[in-house]
Each structure stands twice: as structure tokens, then as C-alpha cells.
Amino acid sequence: MELALLAAYAALILWTGRTSEKHTTESFYVNNRAGSAWNVAFSIVVSCVGASAVIGMIGMAFVVGVPAFWWLGAGAAGLTVLSLFLAGAVRRSGAYTLPHMAGTFLGNSARPVIAAVIVVAWMAILAAQFAALVKVLGPLTGFSPPVCLGIGFLLVCGHTVGGQPAVMRVDKMQAVIIIGALTTMLVWLSWRNPSWTENVVFEAVNSSFPPEKLLYFLVVVGANYVVCPMLFGRMLSARDGRTAKRGGLIGVGGILLCSALIVAVGLACKGLIPASTPQDEVLTSVLAGEMPRGMHIVISFALISAIVSSADSCLVTAATVFSYDLLGRDDAASARRCVVMLGAAGVLVSLWGKGILGFLLAAYDIFACGVVMPVFVGLVSRRRPGALWSCVAVGAGGLLGLLSAATENALFSYAGIAVSLVVALGGAVSGGTAKCGEGESGMIAIGTGADVNRPASENSNKSVLPQL
């Protein structure tokens, strides 16, 4: 039965990707910029609340308690900043990707550097999705990890070759599925383990989640939601700036709801399985060992659905950046080839065995330290860093972030963010280019000044004009 359902699900995913496939760059990259606020919001929620985060957060709540809320709570705080202060300007830029937009105010030579950091970081996020898929598919089907990875590759890539239209087409449905699945799990666990609420302690930090951990989440994880190529992609797909802002704020509410549900599920698992259960195996242990077979199957397919929806967002982001900003190609066929190539790379990276949250935190370290601060300074300051300063900021910060990921020492993350910010501010103060106009809330209404339907290489020397 499970294999028949998996085959039907795979057929549905492949059909969705095929029927959503468009041959224009505007469609593949930004869904023809036709997204409503609710479409943007549901896509944001599904992109941020993938099964990798669900499995990781449930395990974290099982171990550290209520403070696990900050995994997505910090992200919601960062998304609030993006929605209130940057979303309108991002949408008005008319760009296809974050590096495309950033190149207009940080200098064209900074664009490939930023693009390279994004591709590396998002490969780690994609690897986390594949690692989560193995955790879910293995117990459900009995297949070995390599076979599960192969199935995951076909599911994710088969869906994503349709570009943003395919990714966003099913996100609304997937958001409803994952919220429904979390609610169903919580209700069943509360029936099975009614005393779980008696030992809940509402606290922001504790001995297992000290203040320095909270600081790391707010600074490093939160920063990744302020400047994020995946979230920028959602803003760029909205109808207009106001729609992008509304969609982001609705998405904040959805993320907070999911975070609360996930933490409650993790807490309700206590007492049902051994306390020594590894974090990444808490949910799958409860599914396989405690839940009835029928519910296990239903919840597992909801998690598979969440993985696919989050993974395709990661993959389409990395593929469009790689194709458009690194290869200088603006045709949908090139982007599709990048989808397949980077999907295979994500599978290989997942074999590293770093663990789901380990992969996600590694990606956050690299991106937050290298890219967030130069782009943020370029967006909000009255003078912009030049290309040389921006490249140094991205390179130095990214290397320190990579060192933090490799050593698991958060001090390197803070140092990376600080160095990147200081260098970017130094460039803005000493030799930056003055802005040519401002939009709402004092922000520059960034415009690429480029014909977005022409190859990236042909737009490299275009001037930047505000679109007010």
C-alpha cells in the first residue's frame, strides 16, 4: 500500500512540474510576477517550514523544551524586518535574483561573489532536505538510504524543472497539509500522553538552551530571513510592492503558528520514547513505534510533501542564481539543466552525515556572515559600498562563516558578521556611491535599470534608476 501511494504521489508531483513548465525567463524565474499576498505567504511558510525543520525542531523541543521555539521564532523576527522595511523596494527592483539586484548597488564585480556564496549555502540547505527525506522514507518503505536518496532526487528535481510556477502552484496546498498534519499529531499525542502539559515550563532560555544560544539564533538565523535569496524570490514574484509586504507579514503569522505546533508536538513526545533518542530520530521513532499504521502513513506523506515543497524552493533558488548570475544565461533551458546538476550535488552533500540541523546551521553561518550585511547596507544606507569593498566584505565574512560551520564555534559567526558589516560600512563612508532616489520609509526604490529579458552579461553596464 505504501509503495502504491508513493508511486501515485510521485506521478502527481511530476505531472505538476510538467504542466507548469513555461519557456519564458520571466515565468521560470519569477512566476510572471503575478503572485497574490496569500500565494506569497503560503509559499514563504512552506519554504521555511520544511520537514527538515519539522524533524529537527521536534527533536530539539524533545531535548531542550520550549526554547526550541526560537528556531523558527528568530526567523519570523527577521521576516518581519524584511516585510516592513525591504519588501517593497525588493519588488520594485524588477530583478530576477538577489545577486542580480545587489549587483546594481554593490558593483557588478560583487555579483558573482554573492552568487557563489548563495549556491554553496543553499546546497547545504538542500542537503538537509534530502537527509530528512531519508529519515521519513526509510521507515515507511523499508528502502535503504541510497534508494531513498534516489527517490528524493526524482521527486524534487522532477517538480522543480517547471521553475517558480511549479514551485508556487502547490505551495498553498502543501501549507495546509503540513499545518493539518502537525495539528493531527498534537491531538493524537495529547490523547496518547495526556500528562505532557504538566511538565511544560514556559521559558526563553534554560540550562540546555543558554542565553548565548538564543543570541546566536536571533543574530545568525534571524539575519538569514532579513536578506534571503529564497524569500527575495517570493517578493519578486508578487504583483507589486504592497502585495509583497502583505504576503510577508501573513507569512510571519504562519511561521509563528507552525513553530508553536512543532514545539508542542516535540514536548508531547516526552515519555513515549527513551530520553536518549537522538534528536533527528524523535519524530520517526514516535511514528514507527507509537502511532497506528494508518496514521503513520498519513503523517509520513505529509512530511514527504513538506520536504519536497521546501527542497524545490531551495533548488530553484540555487539553480536560478547559478544559471543567471554565474553562467550569465537567462534562458529557461539552462536553468533546468542547473536544477538537475545542483539537485545531484545536494544528494552528494547529504552523504556527509552532518545531521539535519547541522546542515541548516552551516548554511546560515556561511550566508549570514558573508552576504547579509553588505546587501543590507546597500539597501538602507544613503551611500553604497563600492564593488571592491563589497567583495572583501562578502569574502571575509563568508570565510569566517565557513570556519564557524566547520568548527561549530559561534564566535567565528559573530566575527564574520562584524567584519562584513564594518567593511561594508567602511566602503559606504569612504568611497561609496550616493543614492539617486528614495522610496517608502526612506528606502531607496531600487531599480535594475536593465532589461530583465536580456542575458545578464548584456545588463552589466546598465545604470541604476529608481522606480518610484
Image: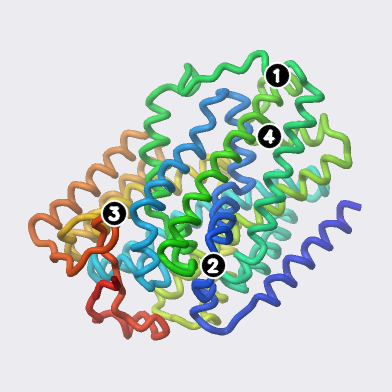
Could you tell me if residue 314 is visible in this image? no
Q: Under tag 3, what secondary structure?
A: helix
Sequence-first tag of 4 and 2: 2
Instruction: Tell me which corner region of the image, top left, top right, bottom left or bottom right, holds residue 159.
Output: bottom right
Q: Is residue 7 left or right of residue 164?
A: right
Q: Under tag 4, what secondary structure?
A: helix
- Of circles 2 and 3, the one toward us is 2
Sequence-first tag of 1 and 3: 1
At label 4, the amino acid type is Glu
**Viewport quadrant of the C terminus:** bottom left
**Residue 196, disc:** 1
State the residue position of label 4. Answer: 281
Q: In 3D space, how far apart are the residues under numbered discs 4 and 2 (Cα atoms)?
A: 37 Å
State the residue position of label 3. Answer: 376
Query: Residue at image x 42%, y 49%?
Result: 225
Q: In 3D space, how far apart are the residues under numbered discs 1 and 3 (Cα atoms)?
A: 43 Å
Q: In 3D space, how far apart are the residues under numbered discs 1 and 4 (Cα atoms)?
A: 19 Å
Q: In 3D space, how far apart are the residues under numbered discs 4 and 3 (Cα atoms)?
A: 37 Å
Relative to 290, does residue 370 appear above or below in the rendering? below
Q: Under tag 2, what secondary structure?
A: loop
Query: Residue at image x 49%, y 72%?
Result: 33
